[in-house]
Image: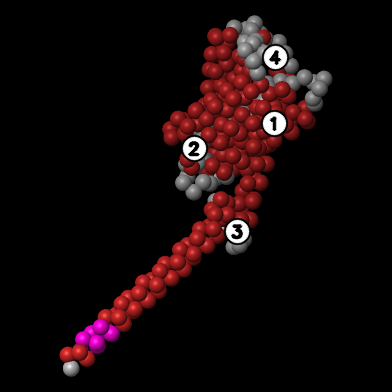
Amino acid sequence: MGVNDPENPSLMKIAASFGFMIFVLTQFIGPVSGGHINTAVSLSLWIAGKISFIRYVAYTISQMIGSIFGGLALWAIFGSNWPAARAFGSNSWDPAIFNDGQILFSEMIGTGILILTVFALLDHRDGDGGPLGTFPIGMSVMVAHLFLLEIDGCSINPTRSFGPTVVAIAAGIPGDYIKQHYIFWIGPYLGSVAASLGYLASKAVVQKDPSHPEEHFVENLVQPVVERRGSQTTTEAERERERGGGRVRRRRSHTDAITSSNETLKL
């Protein structure tokens, strides 16, 4: 597999393309619609109570339609015979190497990584993911692709898998991707539910435990240092005031002594 081989792009090239494209898409779509381009993420936000069920359904339908248009674009660009197209990005696996359960679990893990990253950004104190914006989301997608690409092509997004599969069927491209497609709905959905419930449960525990306030964990690490520095600064200021006061008292004593001497001489 050559780095510059157009028919066999490198693993890193594909993973980076997905990761950075997700970063770009969520960055500029986010202010418009919340950046919903993955039904598994939309499901997790509905579970967390951040969007309504009607909005979740609307997002999912929109994603499916957009995915079909994406598949059609790939068909128009690459045609039906280019080996690297791999049925326009449809997900599948080799049944001689992996079974359904292994693929299901792999997709759950990859989707869970993405969902936890999304929740972490949403809970950031600034409400916008902080200075990195949606960059961590893109990197989580890239990480998932790095370990899933060679297993099943990496879905972690049922609607992303849906469009290419529909277009590949329309183009008459044969393959196991048709009968294997259902896994790429069940796996990401299960991963989304598991990650969402796990995150909400851990958050509830933190809120109930007074010894672990719900703050950014970095602040919890930095705050003691800041307090120590603040107390040191206060102590130094007090010492400086004491030294200054001592100098003033000495000056006053010296001035009083001179005044007393002058009065004695006058007498």
Q: Position of residue 178 (x, y in %)?
A: 70, 18
Mark 1 Cα shell of 10 Å, populated few (<14), some (14-19), many (≥20): many
If the image is split into quadrants, where does the N terminus sit? top right
Q: CA distance from mark 1 to mark 2?
A: 25 Å
Mark in front: 4 vs 1 = 4
Query: What residue did someone put label 1 on?
Result: 107
Give the residue drawn at x 61%, y 34%.
140
Task: Confirm whether residue 221 shows in the render.
Answer: yes
Q: CA distance from mark 4 to mark 3?
A: 50 Å
Q: Is residue 123 left or right of residue 199?
A: left
Q: Amino acid at mark 1?
A: Glu
Question: Under tag 4, what secondary structure?
Answer: loop
Q: Amino acid at mark 2?
A: Gly
Residue furthest left as drawn: 266
Q: Amino acid at mark 3?
A: His
If the image is split into quadrants, where does the C terminus sit? bottom left
